[in-house]
């Protein structure tokens, strides 16, 4: 799964990288602990590429309130096309969520959740495969999104059994619907060597934690 991530790159750089028009509603960066229900920067291609803000937490149209059902921050690649909440969005409203890295937790021997910070091996920007949905009730309207996850690839399997789907730049047009059909083939983990990970401190276990120290490698004490 993916429950937290970071964005440390400037918005202007992201707009240039994705060849997208820069929105004026983006959350401030850098951000070292992006959590569900917070606004995130999203690349859409409806009428031209735009970099704009959405709520991380997909709201199906039948939810009466933002908390009217389960919090849908991820959608599984193997079921996204058949789940009632997601099946229309994955056909018609796919998007990309830029990220500098993401956190995942492994299980410690004592049952503790041990946090890891994961980045691209080349240090580049990640593009999470995602879907989006407009939601409105009682005069309240918002655009919302969920990240696509799949079975962990070779770089992640030792940490967790699932990971976010990362779309390489060459496939951005296909995922965004600009290059015809066939985006389903992209919903899988990448090849070995794409990602690297290091342990970080337990501070990030709190969704209130902030600051660049959250991604610093954990220094293990000498035996």
Image (cartoon, rainbow, N blue to C red):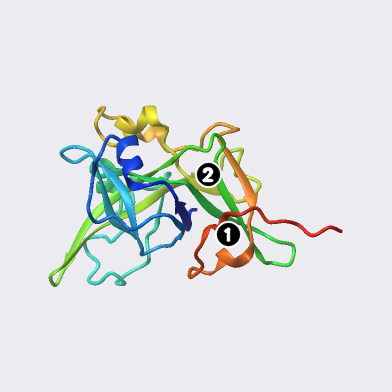
Quarter of the rendering containing residue 202: bottom right
Name the residue beneath numbered marker 2: 151
Residue at the spot x=58%, y=59% of the render? 213
**Numbered circle sitting on residue 162:** none
Describe residue 100's horizontal placement relative to residue 67 as left or right.
right
Q: How many marks?
A: 2
Is disc 2 placed on a helix, strand or loop?
A: strand
- Establish if 195 lies above or below 105: above
Quarter of the rendering containing residue 91: top left
Residue at the spot x=34%, y=33% of the render? 172
Name the residue beneath numbered marker 1: 213
Task: Give the farthest residue toward the right.
Answer: 223
Describe residue 110's horizontal placement relative to residue 82 as left or right.
right
Describe residue 59's horizontal placement relative to residue 157 as left or right.
left
Q: In the picture, which quadrant includes the C terminus? A: bottom right
Quarter of the rendering containing residue 19: top left
- Marked residue nearer the N-terminal end (2 or 1): 2
- Badge 1 crowding class, 10 Å Cα cut-off, few under 14, some 14 to 19, many 20 or more, is some
Residue 3 x/y as whole percent: 47, 58
User: Closer to the camera: disc 2 or disc 1?
Assistant: 1
Q: CA distance from mark 2 to mark 1?
A: 29 Å
Residue at the spot x=64%, y=49% of the render? 198
- Establish if 38 lies above or below 121: below
Residue 141 x/y as whole percent: 18, 64
Residue 119 x/y as whole percent: 54, 44
């Amino acid at each position: 799964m993916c429950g937290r991530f970071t964005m440390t790159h400037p918005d202007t750089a992201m707009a240039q990288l994705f060849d997208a028009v820069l929105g004026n509603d983006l959350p401030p960066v850098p951000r070292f602990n992006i959590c569900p229900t917070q606004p995130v920067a999203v690349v859409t291609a409806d009428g031209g590429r735009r970099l704009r803000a959405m709520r991380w937490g997909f709201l199906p149209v039948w939810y009466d309130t933002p908390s009217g059902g389960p919090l849908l921050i991820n959608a599984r690649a193997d079921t996204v096309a058949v789940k009632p909440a997601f099946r229309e969005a994955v056909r018609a409203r796919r998007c990309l969520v830029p990220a500098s890295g993401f956190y995942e937790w492994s299980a410690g021997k004592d049952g503790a959740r041990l946090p890891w910070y994961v980045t691209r091996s080349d240090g580049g920007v990640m593009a999470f495969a995602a879907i989006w949905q407009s939601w409105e009730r009682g005069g309240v309207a918002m655009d919302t999104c969920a990240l696509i996850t799949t079975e962990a690839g070779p770089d992640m399997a030792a940490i967790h059994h699932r990971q976010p789907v990362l779309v390489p730049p060459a496939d951005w047009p296909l995922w965004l619907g600009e290059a015809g059909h066939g985006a389903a083939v992209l919903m899988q983990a990448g090849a070995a060597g794409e990602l690297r990970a290091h342990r970080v401190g337990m501070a990030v276990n709190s969704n209130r934690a902030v600051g660049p120290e959250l991604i610093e490698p954990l220094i293990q004490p000498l035996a």
